[in-house]
Structures are given as structure tokens and as C-alpha cells.
Amino acid sequence: MKYAVKHYAGILLLTRKDEGREISFDIEGVLAPPAGKSPESSDWLSWIALKESELKKEGIKVLDAGRILAMEENADAVDLAVVKKALEEAGNAEHLGVLRRINFYLTLESMRNFAVDDQMVIQAVAMHEELAKVCNRLSSRLREWVYWSLPEARMVPDNRVLSELVSKKRPEELSGELIGRMKSVDVSIKPFGARPVMWSSIQKSAQKILELYELRDSIEKEIESLMENCCPNLKEVAGALIGAKLLSHAGSLKRLCSMPASTIQLLGAEKALFRHLTTGARCPKHGLIIQHPLIASAGKNRGKASRMLADKIALAARIDYFKGGFRGKQLRKELEEKLR
Amino acid sequence: MRRRNQRRRTNTKLEMLGKKFPNIYSLAGGKGKRLFTESLTGKESFPEETLIRMNGKVFREWEPERSKLAAAIMKDISQIGIREGMNVLYLGAAHGYTVSFISDIIRTGMIFAVEKAPQVVRELILVSAERKNVAPVLADAQDFEELGRRVPLVDFVYQDIAQQNQTEIFTRSCRAFLKPGHFGMLAVKARSIDVSRKPKEIFNEVRRTLERELVVVDYRYLDPFEKDHCLFVCKKRN
């Protein structure tokens, strides 16, 4: 990031170029609220408006508190390092205050740039994982509850289908339907006479659980479109969800792309890796990428396959970080041919 | 749950900890030592802090479980070298917990709190916004070019970062930013240097490395507050 300190209309400003325009911060606190006024008070807002109109006359536009868009072209620029040195030599507390404000605004400014796509993917993945856990726990609880009224529910192995059925149907018809699915049942005995207990609560819970499943799906779709945006190559090679999990494990796309393939191969297998390092147990072959279909289908060659996949993922992540166009299809084809 | 929730006492007595620990107070009587500093803002800085009001002043409790510096004081470190009016460089500021207490101690000085993870800088900025002596610096502690532009010469360097080359970073930053004859403090996490070796071995090695350039005045293992951590107090040679 390039920044400098400039004098505009008698105000000392910290400036930096941002997409063609120049954004500056008022480092002497000209725009700070006057003593005794809090930044939230309406007095302060009207005060800022007053200052704004004063500055406008000088050719300076206030963006929001402390941020300024400087219009004047030929202001005298000074390098930040020079300013810092001058402040240091002056050495009194007031100048340190200026240095503090410089740092404050620079930090605020780079914070704005951090809420980017890969961070959003990471947040979404965390939510997705948590939802998956919650869904599983809640639906096994539901299953346990339903069994008391409707033991036939065992015929439905899938949690999601079960909560769908329970939320939509009356217990009697559900019972009939499920018994119909069983082979060779002696219907005349009717072994499972359904006596629904608290069915309305069960039904409500099932509905909520179903909603959670739907929420998880919609987040998954969102992750896919986000991944398509920010790392298309990674998405093609690793798959949207695995790619996103790798991202969240690494912390950011930048960190993922600076990792060697061997690290990527073992992301998510840290426990096994450290066990290997400390006790000399066997070394893990794969971490998160085990969920990838190519590795699942590799059979005995899983170690080899995961190494190759990690290679290609590392390449893809680097292409994505340095915005190198779309090469994912080719990478994936190479991988599939090797593993055939 | 934190242990002591916002319990406000009126008739308790705080005592200065000693000449070597200016602006740090301990609670007289009762079981065990508890540390306090006088709040610069007149209120708490983090949720669920224990506050004590005395003579119109507000004191915040400094929990050794959350701050390595407090843990070292609890373990009777001989001195910390931070005084009122000093300028401090703090590498690895995280949420700003320890930073807020150093800010209480130095009062008129200035802390440059360096942290590279934007997720925690969100909170550090809030700490800095209400304390006029904290300057947040979102930068990598290893990026000396950037730090050199943003941080002045200081009277005290505190470093708490979990990096493999943390010792090297510390000696380099003392070389670059610390005035001669002044103190620096390094919190070493043995697990981030090498998980497979014994912590004591690592601490000895760190000590040898430090002594090549600095004088190691004192050190403390931080058990039971932090596992496998050690805090070194160093002095830069004149």
C-alpha cells in the first residue's frame, strides 16, 4: 500500500490512492468531535456538516468521519517515513498522538479491505458445518421420539426424509404407508398400533429440522456461487465444498496458495500428523481431501491419489490467487487420466 | 463462565504492588493475590471484568489466566520495566487484553499495538478508540519495512506471538525499535517452536540465543496459568 502525507488547504492529511481516486485521513484531528461531545450526538453531526461546508470551499470533500476525498491536484506530498522521523525527533506527546491517528486510520482502512470473498466463504463454511452437526443431532433426537409412537419409522433410514414425512402426514396414514413398505407383514395382527403421543410437538420439531436442512442447502448453494466468483479453479479441481473447507482451514486464499502441496494434502489431519511426529505412529495419507470422489474411488491407491490431488489443488489455488484465468478443466482432466 | 462476575466491592483495600511495579495494585487480605490497575477510561474495557471503586477511582482486575504478563507478575517476576510515560511497542496484541492494562500502567505514554489478524483487530480498534494511548497497527510483526514506517523508537518492547522464529523476531525488533539500556519482554510458547521437543530444552535454547545480544534479567515459567510458556525479561545493552 502506498501512502503519503500531504498538506491540503492548511490541513495535514494522510493520503493513499484507491482505484484512481485519492482518499485521505485527517491526522491532526480537525474533524474529531470537539471536546465534551460524543461522536454519536446530533451536535457532532451538525458540527461535521459545518466543517464539511467549510472544507468544500477549499476543494475538499468529506466522505465520512475522518475520511476525506481531496480534490486538489498539486498538494505537496511527503513520504510517511519522513513524517515519522520528523515526529520522532520532535518527540512530544502531541506528535505521538498524530502518529497514533495515522496508524488508526491506516488500520481502519485495511480492515475495510479484508471483508472479501474468501473470508465470506470461510464464514459460510463454518456455518454450514455447524448446521450439519445440529441437523444430525436434532434428527436423531426426533427419531428417538417418533419411535415411541411409530416404531415403523425404522423403515426410513434417511433422517431428512423422515422429518419430511413426519412433518407432512398424520400418524395413521404414515403408519399404513410404512407398513406397506415392509415385506410380508401379517397385517391381520397389526403389530404396530400407532398411538400418537404429543404428535403436534413432534410435527413442529420435524418442520423446524426440515427448515434447518433447507437452510443448509441454501448456504451450500451460496458457497458454490461464491467459490465460482473468487476461486473458480479451486472449485473445479477440489469441488466447491471441499475447496471452501480447505480455504477455511488455511485461513485465507493467500495462505492456502502459499502452502506446499504436502501441507494441503494433510490439512484437517493435524491430530494424526502430530501423533506421527511425537510418537512415531504411522503418517496420515490425507486430511480434508478424503471426501473428494476421486480419492474415494481410488481404492488401495488412496495415498497416491491424494498426493496427486493435493498437487493440483495447490496449483489451482495459486492460479486463483494471482488471477491467472480458468485452467481448472485442464487440471482436472490431467488428474483423472493419471488416476484411471 | 468467568469466575467473578462484576462483583463490586466498596470497603476493600488496594495496595501498591511495589516500587518495581508502578501503577499495579494488589488486593490486601483474602486468599491469594489478585492484580488490579486503575482504569484509564473510568470503566471496564472488556465484558465481565471485576471492578473495584475506591476513593472515586475505578480499578480493573487483571486476570493471569488471560494475560501472560499478569501471570509472570503472579509468579513473582523480579521486575517488568514498564513505567508511567513510556512508549511501548507491543507485538502480537490480539484482542488487546494485555494492551489495555499496559495502557493503564503507562497512562501518558503510547502503545503501538501490532497485530496481523484482521479478525481480532476489529476488537483492538475498539480498545484503541477509547484509549488515547493505544495506536493499533494492522501489520505483520515480521514486516520490518512496514513497521519502520509506522512505529517510532520506544522505551519498551513486549512480544507475544506464536511463531516458530519468535526469538529471532524479538531480537530483531529490539535492535530496530528499542532504545539502548531499556527493557524488553518476550513470551515464548514452546509448542509453536517445536511440538516434539521438551519445553525446558527450548527455553534454554531461547535464553542462549537472547543472551547473544541482550541481558536476560529474569524469566518465569508460566505454569499453572499457561502451559509450556515462559516469559523472559531482557535489557538491551548500552
Image (tube, coloured by chain):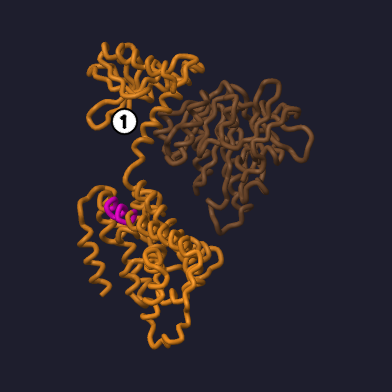
Chain colours: A orange, B brown
Horizontal side, residue A196 vs residue B203: left or right: left
Q: Chain of mark 1?
A: A
**Residue B158 inside the magenta-drawn segment:** no
Residue A279 at x, y = what percent? 56, 67
Tell me where the magenta segment starts and ends, as one range.
A219-227
Residue A262 at x, y = what percent? 38, 61
Amino acid type at circle 1 is Lys
Residue in the foreground of this view, choosing between A43 and B194: A43
Q: Residue at x 43, y 74 (%)?
A: A153
Residue in the foreground of this view, choosing between A57 and A335: A57
Q: Is residue A28 visible?
A: no
Horizontal side, residue A60 vs residue B19: left or right: left
Horizontal side, residue B89 vs residue A45: left or right: right
Residue B14 at x, y = what percent? 73, 28
Q: Residue furthest right?
A: B29
Horizontal side, residue B67 vs residue A180: left or right: right
Q: Quadrant of the N terminus of chain A?
A: top left
